[in-house]
Amino acid sequence: MIFMKLSEMRSTSLQDLKEQVIQLRSELAKERAVIAGGTRPENPGRIRNLRKTIAKLLTVANERERKGEKLVVVEKQGKASKGKGLIGKVIKRRKRRSGR
């Protein structure tokens, strides 16, 4: 599990950020599977820490994207999608009413 300070996150490369997001999302999925299975997790606070760390990593990635760098997050396709394997998803800034 990766818990880093924001200063450490900002100093890491974009590729490392991408790998850490993928790793943390898989850990979060495992923790949620434990709960869905009906058992009690060893550390319930870990889920919250994982979610917050993922949010911090994506925030740093979004900051870099606004400066001109691109981040492609690779995710597994779900059952609903017909293709197999991994897909690339570019994280884009959402348009808000205030940003029109």
Image (cartoon, helix red, strand yellow):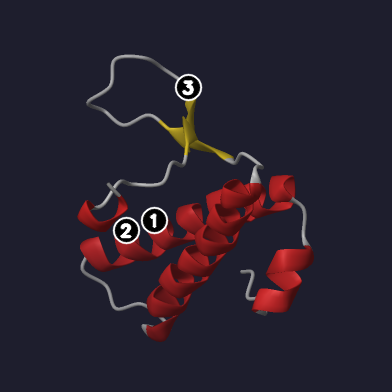
What amino acid is labelled 3 in the image? Gly
Quadrant for residue 38, please give it: bottom left
**Which circle's residue, 3 or 2, is located before the other in the chain?**
2
Q: Residue at x 27, y 72 (%)?
A: 39
Name the disc covering residue 29, or none: 1
Q: Is residue 70 left or right of residue 84?
A: right
Helix, strand or loop at label 2? It is helix
Quadrant for residue 15, please give it: top right
Place of residue 33 in the rendered image (x, y in percent of width and height, measured from the top left): 32, 58
Residue 68 higher or lower than 24, as above or below: above
What amino acid is labelled 1 in the image? Ala
Name the disc covering residue 69, or none: none
Residue 87 higher or lower than 69, as above or below: above
Q: Quick check: marks 3 and 2 in contact, CB under 8 Å?
A: no
Q: Residue at x 43, y 41 (%)?
A: 92
Q: Is residue 14 left or right of residue 85?
A: right
Say few, some or many: other residues with alpha carbon within 10 Å of mark 3 (under 14 / 14 to 19 / 20 or more).
few
Name the disc covering residue 33, or none: 2
Q: Residue at x 42, y 69 (%)?
A: 51
Q: Nearer the viewer, mark 2 or mark 1?
A: 1
What amino acid is labelled 2 in the image? Ala
Name the disc covering residue 85, or none: 3
Q: Nearer the viewer, mark 3 or mark 2?
A: 3
2 or 62, nearer to the observer: 62
Q: Quick check: marks 2 and 1 in contact, CB under 8 Å?
A: yes
Q: CA distance from mark 3 to mark 2?
A: 21 Å
